[in-house]
């Protein structure tokens, strides 16, 4: 099997990764719980990229929900939007990818998930927006992989600031270490965001 960037691709492996944006919303939670249990009964597991800050902003605790997903054999990873201040909803929210904000958002959400008993090792950025400082801080916090890039499928994407397209998994080298970047293959409006039916939003393939 060929080696690329020090990674051996396994062409049979497909990793299901779900952006769990609104676990505090009971409608979303009921659907997430149902599918997490459905997968558990079939011996399947997924990664739920959980954004704890949105729940905190509406005063809802999601620790028991996060722990229940983890107890079903699924991975809890971290999803963070780099919004400025406390606004997490449109039209008020505004991205701030300045270093101070990126570091503080990453630390805040990592600490929240760790306090729930699920120290995250995987990450995906809100709106797939990344920068070098983000990768440095992920390494500082002990993350091992990132799903913020998307899989390049042959159509040249328009130039997008702070977004990355990859043909395959890649070890990204930054000043203080390396992080494994696993590109997502797709995105759907029918994710677990409370606006549509529950469904897998992203799939990260290792090939
Ligand atoms: Zn998001």
Image (cartoon, rainbow, N blue to C red):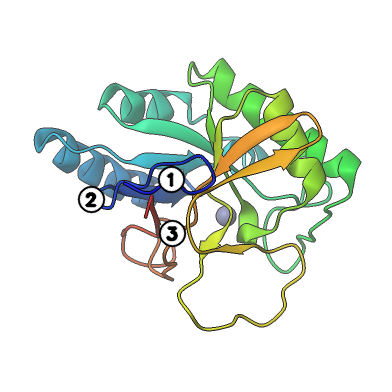
Location of mark 2 (residue): 12
Disc 2 residue crowd, few under 14, some 14–19, many 20+, Cα 10 Å: few
The tag earlier along the polypeptide, 3 or 1, is 1
| Residue at screen point 81% across, 34% down | 175
Where's residue 174, x and y in %? 76, 39
User: Dividing the picture into quarters, in which one does residue 8 lie?
Assistant: top left
Q: Nearer the viewer, residue 43 or 11?
A: 11
Rounded to the nearest angstrom, the CA distance separating label 2 from label 3 is: 31 Å
Position of residue 115 in the picture relative to residue 153 (left or right): right
Location of mark 3 (residue): 194
Of labels 3 and 1, the one closer to you: 1
Where's residue 58, x and y in %? 62, 42
Q: In which quarter of the image is the C terminus?
A: bottom left
Check if mark 2's residue and mark 3's residue have beta carbons within 8 Å.
Answer: no
Rounded to the nearest angstrom, the CA distance separating label 1 from label 2 is: 15 Å
Does 109 sit above or below residue 189? above
């Amino acid at each position: 099997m060929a080696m690329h960037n020090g990674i051996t691709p396994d062409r049979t492996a497909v990793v299901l990764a779900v952006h769990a944006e609104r676990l505090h919303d009971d409608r979303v939670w009921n659907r997430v719980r149902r599918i997490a249990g459905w997968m558990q009964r079939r011996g399947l597991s997924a990664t739920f990229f959980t954004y704890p800050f949105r729940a905190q902003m509406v005063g809802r605790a999601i620790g028991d929900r996060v722990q229940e997903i983890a107890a079903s054999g699924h991975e809890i990873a971290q999803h963070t939007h780099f919004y400025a201040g406390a606004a997490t909803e449109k039209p008020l929210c505004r991205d701030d990818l300045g270093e101070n904000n990126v570091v503080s958002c990453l630390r805040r959400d990592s600490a929240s998930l760790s306090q729930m008993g699920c120290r995250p090792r995987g990450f995906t950025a809100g709106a797939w927006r990344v920068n070098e400082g983000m990768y440095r801080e992920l390494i500082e916090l002990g993350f091992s992989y990132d799903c913020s890039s998307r899989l390049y499928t042959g159509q040249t994407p328009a130039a997008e600031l702070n977004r990355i397209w990859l043909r395959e998994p890649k070890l990204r080298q930054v000043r203080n270490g390396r992080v494994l970047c696993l590109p997502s293959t797709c995105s759907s409006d029918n994710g677990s965001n409370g606006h549509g039916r529950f469904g897998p939003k992203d799939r990260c393939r290792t090939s």
